[in-house]
Amino acid sequence: MDEALRTSPRATPWRLWLSGGWLTLFFGVALLAPWIAPHDPLYQDLFLQRLPPFWIDGAETGHPLGTDSLGRDVASRLMHGASVAATVALIAGLATCLLGSVLGLLAGFYRGWVDQVISRIVDIWMSFPPVLFAILLVAVIGTGLTSVIVAIIVIDWTRFTRVVRAETMAQARMDYTEAAHVAGMSRFATLMREILPNVAPVILSVLTLQMGIAIVVEAILSFVNLSVSTDDPTWGGMIAEGRVSIHQAWWVLIFPMIALFLTVLSFTQFGDALRNRFDPVLR
Amino acid sequence: MSAYLEITGLNAVLRGTRTRVLRDVSLSVSKGQVHGLVGESGAGKSMIGKAILGVLPRAIEVASGRISLGGQDLGVLPLRERLRVIGSQTAVIPQDPLTALNPSRRIGPQMTDRLTRTLGWQKTRANHRALDLLEEVAIRDPERVLHSYPHELSGGMRQRVLIAAAFAAEPKLIVADEPTTALDVTVQKQILKMIADMQTRHGTTMLFVTHDLGVVARVCQSVSILHSGMVMEEADIRTMLTAPAHPYTAALLAATPRYTDPEASLVPVSDTVLAGVAEAIRASDTLWGRA
Amino acid sequence: MSALVDIRDLVVSYPDMARKPLLGAAPRNTVLHGITLAVGRGQIIGIVGESGSGKSTLGRAILRLIEPDQGQIVFDGTDITHLDDRALRALRPRFQMIFQDPMSSLNPRQTLHRLIATPLAIRGDTQAMDKAANALDRVGLPSRFLARYPHELSGGQRQRVGIARAIVQSPDFIVADEIASGLDVSSQAVVLTLLQDIVRETGTTLAFISHDLSVVRRLCDSVVVMAGGKIVEAARTTTLFNTPQSGYTRKLLEAIPLPEPDQVW
């Protein structure tokens, strides 16, 4: 009975293809922005202010997504903004994941005082309001991409620690952990070779979520002018500027918002879809 | 004695396919009798109960066949009427007393829901009824239990509450789905005796789903042995135990351990028997494929 | 002939976290109250009891998977009660365990090959692959199964992998903890008779933990009945079933529903 239900045909992995496709585009553009962007993202041309995107009357052929109130090319700024977002997503995401997961694994596996110490720090850490914390941090250590990345790591490692600790504890309670013990495996080898592979899918899905969140945090910090220098194009900065001229030139606001939304959504969807597709246990 | 529950040619399939999970099931249970549905996992024994109650999983649908309760063919009734008949004439004793009760509601309303909602009883009358039944299942302080939350009761108490709740609306048919599977033998004995007592006293017809031939022997008067959703043998209990007609039944009996006869215990089911079962299923599927 | 496993006055307790005060240690619940038991070489001993009787704790304590509070565990002449991790690891291949739930005891992300060969590979056995294939063959599974994952198998097949993993190291002693409780009767018959054949053939000593007296009657040479962390009765199997001494044992026997028409119940 259960057998029959389980082998029902698997649907086409649309989720995987769509989110994966968008992320490929995102990282491709981020990497190649300096060569494929049609204009210098900082070049101002006050004669070409607030040109509309291509499908609206009055558009110029060289500016497919229009220009902003200083006459800068929206498409080019969007592409360079993707570079910033991708850098933050990758570096902040991976570093947060590494720090948080290691602590979570140790706390969940060794329990006792290790767990006590780590868990108390997590509790205390999480009682700070995160965005405020980030703003304070950047204000203290100065603006710039590095500061943004450091701020995200410092705030968000707890997300991994909590989830990974819980999953590690659940896996450590499984009999296979005890079986490894009976087989004569050392404690550390049990953690790395038996438990970690079972916790990995959870880490992966939190990682993709975290990459999305990192992009959002960067955008928020840009929005309040605490990210990279004001001149450099970022999606958050574009949204902030677009807000001012929303009635004259909505596209300055809308395009970075769509890009932000699709990228963050793709990250979370990609993580889930990947897991559904390739996890031998779920398959 | 007349049959209360009658199933004829019941076929259930994976939704949208011709793959059967119940194969041409027919059985009848006389009024006031306990009928066992026995089989190993995947035999479809729970599916039959679920099909009667109209609670099959989403992925499964009834393809053909007739189910009647007290002479009333359920299939011809409009949905609303069918729900009313099922709601007023049947009840379930579930397998897992832990998850069968809502942890955030008190026992009382959970027991009387069906009385007040489906049957339109007054609240006080329903409460009285619940108190009487809790006393019947030997719960010492029924008043307190009615006002308790499930987590405040022991596992055995919860099981008894569920038995009492099943009899609350004086159903004509109760489906008991492996109600003692997870219990220790001494507790199992108490619970089974309690179910049997209640069943006799209330004259309820019962379908008893289990994988345990010993339990069937103690509780049921007749039995259907199932494999792959197909009835291998329907017989009265004594015949099944002493002179099984189907080789598969005999093989199951020999595989079942019993301390009174260790030599006839844990005998693996032979390939010949399994081949015979597979052949019967194939033959039935061929007929079904032609239909 | 001396006993292979000799247990004296074994006491085990767990901290009761539910009653732990905010500061300080949790009070302890004693689950084994001074168990004394000797298991002869090549014997199959049944350890029977209801839930909470302490039978599983006993099995785990013998293998030093749980630290005892008091008492002594002697394995083949060596007192292993206080051996440190390293010394214990050296002895591990000689005593093995088969777990109740094969879904949880077989790492879902490892192929059968890895599951069975790992204990050997840890000790640098170069023939690990061949031995794994042999063990799998001995439990009646084809060697092409080596590349499969546990979730691709049926319950009975998984438990056979559990047996293969235990026997691949040719141990002297195996603890089997309720290994048939999740199986259908037909798979149970296959798995248990298989285990019985293997230990008889290799002369392995087996502690068979079960709640099912009928199964124990069929498999074991002697039986220990436990309740509330104590041994209620211990005897040779035929003696225990023919003339049970303790009222508790009789009560357990009488409660078992038998597939027979005329049981007084």
Image (tube, helix red, strand yellow):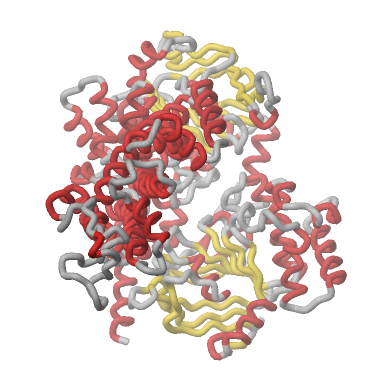
Image x and y of residue A94, in percent: 32, 38
Vertical position of residue C90 compared to residue C107: above or below: above
Q: Residue at x 59, y 65 (%)?
A: B208
Q: Residue at x 18, y 51 (%)?
A: A33
| Total marks in image | 0
Q: Residue at x 61, y 22 (%)?
A: C13
Vertical position of residue C90 compared to residue B52: above or below: above
The quadrant in which residue C11 appears is top right
Image x and y of residue C133, in percent: 20, 36
Instruction: Please name whichever residue, A11 or A150, is drawn nearer the observer in this view of the structure.
Output: A150
Q: Residue at x 28, y 79 (%)?
A: B286
Vertical position of residue C167 compared to residue B217: above or below: above
Instruction: Please name whichever residue, A204 or B85, is drawn nearer the observer in this view of the structure.
Output: A204
Instruction: Please name whichever residue, B66 or C115, is drawn nearer the observer in this view of the structure.
Output: C115
Whether residue C118 is visible, yes or no, is yes
Q: Is residue A12 left or right of residue C218?
A: left
Picture quarter with the N terminus of chain A = bottom left
Image x and y of residue B110, in percent: 72, 63
In the rendered image, the residue lying farthest to the left is A35
Picture quarter with the C terminus of chain A = bottom left
Vertical position of residue C10 compared to residue A37: above or below: above
Whether residue C163 is visible, yes or no, is no
Q: Is residue B178 left or right of residue A99?
A: right
Image x and y of residue C164, in percent: 30, 35
